[in-house]
Image (cartoon, rainbow, N blue to C red):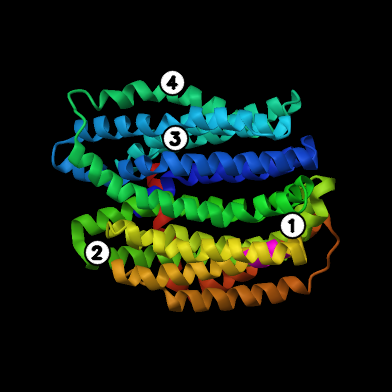
C-alpha cells in the first residue's frame, strides 16, 4: 500500500513543488514586501483558525473510516462527522465580525477576513480528500489536491495582478476550494444517506480528534509565533523577508514530506490493523529509512544553495534576507517533517492522541519564550535561533513520549550512512566556484545530487537499489 501511494501521489508532489516555487518567485515580485508580510500574517491566522475549529473532524474522518466500514456504520460515520463540522464552523462568521471591529490597517483586515472565510471551504475539501485517502482512492485524492494547489495559485496570482494585495493568495485558494467543494460535496453527502447522528460516535471522535487538533494548534504556534512577534517587535517588511526565506526552505522540504506522509500514514494504519505490531514495525522501518534517504540530503543541499536559489526565486527587495533565513529553516524544516510525518504517528496509531498535546507543548512553549527573549535582542536572527532550537526539542519530545504509546523503529544505520554521505556531498559542493544565479544553482545541485546518489547507491544504504527497482517495475506495469 505504501509504494502504491508513493507512485500515485507522485504527480501531486510534482505539482505542489512547482507551485510552491512559483508562489515564491511570482508573489515576492508582484507583491511589495509589506504586502507579502500581510499575506504571511493572514495565512497564519487562517491556518490557525481551521486547525482550532475544524481539523479534528478531518482527523476523525481519516482514522475511523476503516473501522466504520468494517462494522457497517459508514452512514452514521458521515452523518455524525458532518453535523459536528457544521457546529464548529458556525464560529467562523463570528470571528470575521470580530476582526472587522478590530483597529487593524485595512489591507491586513481584508486579508485576515478572506483567510477566515477560505478556511471553511478548505476544510470541506480536506474532509473529501481524507475520505478518499483513507479509502485507498489514490487517484481521487490526488486530483483534488492538484486542482486545489494549481488552481488556487493561478486565481491568487490573477487577483494579485488585479491589485488585491496580500489578500490575493488566500482568496485564490478559497475560490478554487469552493468550486471543488461544489463538485464533490453532493457525492460525499450521499454516503450519509440513512445514517444518523450518534452521540457515542461523536464522543469517540472528539476524544480522538480534539487532541490531534490541539497538537496541530501547538505546531502552528511553533510555526507562526516567530512571524507574529517579528511583526509586533519590528515591522511587516521584516515579516515578509522572514516568510520568503521560510517558504523557500520549508516548502521545498514539505513537498517531499507531504508526499511520503500521504502514502505512509494509511499504510501504517493498514499494517497495524491487519498484522499487529510486527507488521507495523516492518512497514515503519521501511518508511523511515526511505524518508531519511530522501529528505536529509535535500535539507543539507538546500542550505548549500541558499544564495543562488534566493537570487533566482525571490524578488530583489526580499532576496538578501531570504538567503540568510533559508539555511536555518532547512534544518528546522527537516526536524519538523520527521517529527510530524513519522514520530508523531505513534500517538495516532495507538489512538493515544492526548499524548500529542504533551509532545507539542514543550517546543511550542519554548518557541514563544525564546522568541520573546531573542527577537528584541537579535532581531531576525533571534527568530531563527528560536525556531531551530524549538523544533529540535520537539523531535526529542515526540521520540521519547512516542515510545510509551507505540514503538516506531528509528533507522539509526540508515541515518548515520545518509548523514555521512551528506557531509561528503557538502564538502564537494563547498569547493565549487560560485558564479551566482542559475549557473551556480545548477552546478552545485547537480554535483551534490551526483555525489550523494553515487554514495548511497554504491553502498546500497537501506536496500535502496531494491526499492528503486520495485518502483520502476511498478511504474512500468502501470504505464
Q: CA distance from mark 3 to mark 2?
A: 32 Å
Say if the magenta span includes residue 384.
yes
Query: In the structure shown, which secondary structural element does the residue marked by tag 2 occupy?
Result: helix
Q: Residue furthest left?
A: 71
Distance (Cα) linking label 4 and label 1? 43 Å
Badge 3 density bin: few <14, some 14–19, many ≥20, Cα 10 Å: many
Work out whether mark 4 precedes mark 2 in sequence or the reverse, and give the earlier one: 4
Q: What's drawn in magenta, residue-wise?
A: 382-386
Residue 296 makes an appearance in the image: no
In primary-sequence order, the first of circles 1 and 2 is 2
Residue contact at pointers 4 and 1, CB within 8 angstroms: no
| Disc 1 element | helix
Residue at image x 67%, y 67%?
A: 385
Can you say whether 462 is above or below 28 in the image?
below
Q: Secondary structure at mark 4?
A: helix
> Where does label 1 land, which residue?
442
Q: Nearer the viewer, residue 450 or 121?
A: 121
**First of labels 4, 1 by sequence position:** 4
Is residue 405 on the magenta stretch?
A: no
Where residue 279 is drawn, which disc sits there? 2
Q: Residue 440 appears at what percent x and percent y?
A: 79, 59
The mark that comes first in sequence, 3 or 1, is 3
Identify the image quadrant of residue 35: top right
Q: For the stretch drawn in magenta, what is the main secondary structure?
A: helix
Amino acid at each position: 500500500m505504501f509504494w502504491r501511494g508513493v507512485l500515485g501521489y507522485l504527480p501531486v508532489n510534482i505539482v505542489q513543488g512547482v507551485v510552491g516555487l512559483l508562489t515564491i518567485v511570482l508573489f515576492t515580485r508582484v507583491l511589495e514586501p509589506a504586502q507579502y508580510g500581510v499575506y504571511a500574517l493572514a495565512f497564519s491566522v487562517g491556518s490557525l483558525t481551521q486547525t482550532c475549529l475544524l481539523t479534528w473532524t478531518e482527523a476523525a474522518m481519516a482514522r475511523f473510516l476503516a473501522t466504520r466500514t468494517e462494522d457497517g456504520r459508514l452512514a452514521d460515520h458521515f452523518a455524525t462527522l458532518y453535523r459536528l463540522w457544521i457546529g464548529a464552523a458556525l464560529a467562523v462568521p463570528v470571528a470575521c465580525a470580530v476582526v472587522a471591529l478590530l483597529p487593524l490597517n485595512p489591507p491586513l483586515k481584508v486579508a485576515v477576513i478572506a483567510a477566515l472565510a477560505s478556511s471553511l471551504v478548505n476544510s470541506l475539501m480536506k474532509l473529501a480528500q481524507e475520505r478518499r485517502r483513507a479509502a485507498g482512492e489514490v487517484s481521487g485524492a490526488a486530483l483534488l489536491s492538484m486542482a486545489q494547489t494549481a488552481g488556487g495559485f493561478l486565481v491568487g496570482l490573477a487577483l494579485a495582478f488585479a491589485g488585491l494585495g496580500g489578500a490575493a493568495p488566500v482568496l485564490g485558494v478559497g475560490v478554487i476550494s469552493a468550486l471543488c467543494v461544489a463538485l464533490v460535496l453532493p457525492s460525499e453527502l450521499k454516503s450519509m444517506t440513512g445514517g444518523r447522528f450518534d452521540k457515542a460516535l461523536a464522543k469517540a471522535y472528539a476524544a480522538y480528534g480534539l487532541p490531534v487538533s490541539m497538537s496541530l494548534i501547538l505546531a502552528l504556534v511553533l510555526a507562526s509565533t516567530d512571524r507574529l512577534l517579528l511583526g509586533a517587535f519590528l515591522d511587516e517588511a521584516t515579516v515578509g523577508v522572514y516568510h520568503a526565506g521560510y517558504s523557500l526552505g520549508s516548502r521545498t522540504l514539505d513537498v517531499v514530506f507531504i508526499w511520503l506522509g500521504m502514502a505512509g500514514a494509511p499504510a501504517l494504519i493498514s499494517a497495524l490493523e491487519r498484522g499487529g505490531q510486527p507488521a507495523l514495525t516492518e512497514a515503519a522501518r521501511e518508511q523511515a529509512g526511505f524518508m531519511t534517504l530522501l529528505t536529509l540530503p535535500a535539507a543539507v543541499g538546500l542550505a548549500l544553495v541558499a544564495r543562488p536559489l534566493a537570487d533566482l526565486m525571490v524578488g530583489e527587495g526580499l532576496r538578501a534576507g531570504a538567503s540568510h533565513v533559508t539555511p536555518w529553516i532547512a534544518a528546522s524544516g527537516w526536524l519538523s517533517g520527521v517529527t510530524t510525518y513519522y514520530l508523531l504517528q505513534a500517538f495516532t496509531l495507538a489512538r493515544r492522541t492526548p499524548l500529542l498535546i504533551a509532545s507539542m507543548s514543550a517546543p511550542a512553549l519554548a518557541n514563544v519564550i525564546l522568541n520573546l527573549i531573542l527577537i528584541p535582542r537579535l532581531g531576525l536572527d533571534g527568530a531563527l535561533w528560536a525556531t531551530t532550537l524549538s523544533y529540535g526539542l520537539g523531535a526529542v519530545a515526540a521520540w521519547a513520549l512516542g515510545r510509551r504509546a507505540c514503538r516506531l523503529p528509528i533507522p539509526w544505520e540508515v541515518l548515520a550512512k545518509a548523514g555521512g554521505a551528506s557531509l561528503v556531498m557538502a564538502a564537494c559542493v563547498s569547493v565549487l566556484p560560485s558564479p551566482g544565479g542559475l549557473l551556480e544553482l545548477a552546478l552545485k545541485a547537480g554535483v551534490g545530487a551526483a555525489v550523494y546518489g553515487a554514495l548511497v547507491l554504491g553502498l546500497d544504504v537501506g536496500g535502496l537499489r531494491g526499492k528503486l527497482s520495485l518502483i520502476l517495475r511498478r511504474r512500468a506495469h502501470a504505464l
